[in-house]
């Protein structure tokens, strides 16, 4: 495994191109030598977002999120009953707008990847947990419930996303870090959240500002279903962390 020095982890972009562009501008100043895209890329401006990612001039590793998995399942005529009926139109909107090249590309994204980062050792990247792309846990989830999930993975650090809430905690002897969400944070303040690994201080949770009002207007113009509920609210006015923690407590590790 080739060792790298600086890695940017970009998770849960959800088709928010203005947020991604702001992060990429900041990322370039940090001179990263690798990027990991941690799943759930699709959303209102998904074609532009995929195109922008494919044009990056540094090596990029992609892993799929539950969003990509369900969209591909819908395209194949499979079961998407895990998605509440109210939101299935969102999945179908994304599926209908993927061209053949994009479908083939996304279908090849694995569920995890490993990167050897100087100063950190082997880092495992997954979308939700190392065992699947949908389990929810937070910084408050009891450690004893997480030990079977994160230990024995031959990684000093595990990076995840999915819940759109950044944190940095220990599970046994493993450092577990949530990169947060570039495009739709579930906690305040508003911004594009991502993760910088390597160098000093080793792991850094980052938040990048951008023009939220202009981004919301651009997202509204896409015709994305339930646009205010699914996208715009998280751009302009994310919920308080306490509210999101209560929500995820009902679905923890289920």
Image (tube, helix red, strand yellow):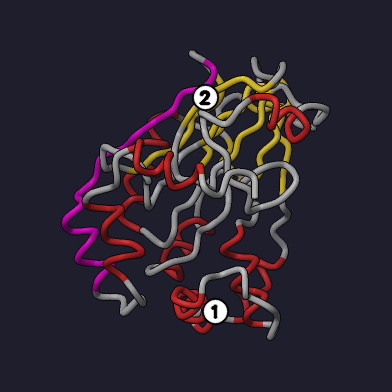
Which labelled disc corresponds to residue 168? 2
Q: Position of residue 214 (x, y in %)?
A: 18, 58
Which quadrant of the structure image shows residue 161? top right
Q: Is residue 212 magenta?
A: yes
Please tell me which residue lies in front, 201 or 136: 136
Q: What SS does tag 1 mark?
A: helix
Label pair 2/1, CB-CB below 8 angstroms? no
Which labelled disc corresponds to residue 2? none
Residue 232 visible, this angle: yes
Q: Which residues are magenta?
A: 202-220
Horizontally, residue 221 falls left or right of residue 89, namely: left
The 10 Å Cα crowd at callout 2, few under 14, some 14 to 19, many 20 or more, is some
In the image, residue 160 above or below residue 51: above
Please tell me which residue lies in front, 197 or 28: 197
Q: Residue at x 24, y 45 (%)?
A: 210
Q: Position of residue 205 (x, y in %)?
A: 44, 28
Q: Is residue 169 magenta?
A: no
Q: Mark 1 — residue?
A: 95
């Amino acid at each position: 495994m080739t060792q790298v020095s600086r890695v940017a982890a970009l998770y849960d972009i959800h088709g928010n191109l203005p947020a991604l562009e702001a992060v990429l501008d900041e990322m370039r100043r940090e001179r990263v030598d690798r990027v990991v895209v941690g799943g759930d890329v699709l959303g209102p401006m998904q074609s532009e977002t995929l195109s922008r990612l494919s044009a990056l001039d540094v090596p990029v590793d992609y892993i799929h999120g539950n969003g990509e998995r369900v969209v591909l399942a819908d395209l194949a005529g499979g079961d998407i009953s895990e998605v509440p009926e109210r939101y299935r139109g969102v999945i179908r909107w994304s599926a209908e707008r993927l061209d053949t090249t994009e479908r083939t590309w996304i279908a090849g994204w694995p569920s995890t990847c490993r990167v050897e980062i100087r100063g950190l050792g082997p880092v495992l990247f997954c979308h939700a947990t190392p065992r699947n792309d949908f389990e929810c846990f937070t910084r408050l989830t009891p450690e004893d419930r997480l030990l079977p999930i994160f230990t024995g993975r031959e990684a000093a650090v595990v990076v995840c996303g999915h819940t759109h809430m950044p944190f940095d905690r220990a599970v046994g002897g493993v450092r577990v870090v949530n990169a947060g969400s570039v495009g739709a944070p579930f906690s305040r303040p508003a911004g594009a959240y991502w993760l910088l690994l390597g160098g000093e201080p080793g792991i850094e949770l980052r938040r990048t500002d951008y023009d939220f009002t202009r981004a919301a207007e651009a997202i509204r113009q896409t015709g994305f279903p339930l646009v205010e509920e699914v996208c715009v609210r998280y751009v302009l006015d994310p919920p308080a962390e306490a509210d999101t923690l209560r929500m995820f407590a009902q679905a923890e590790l289920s």
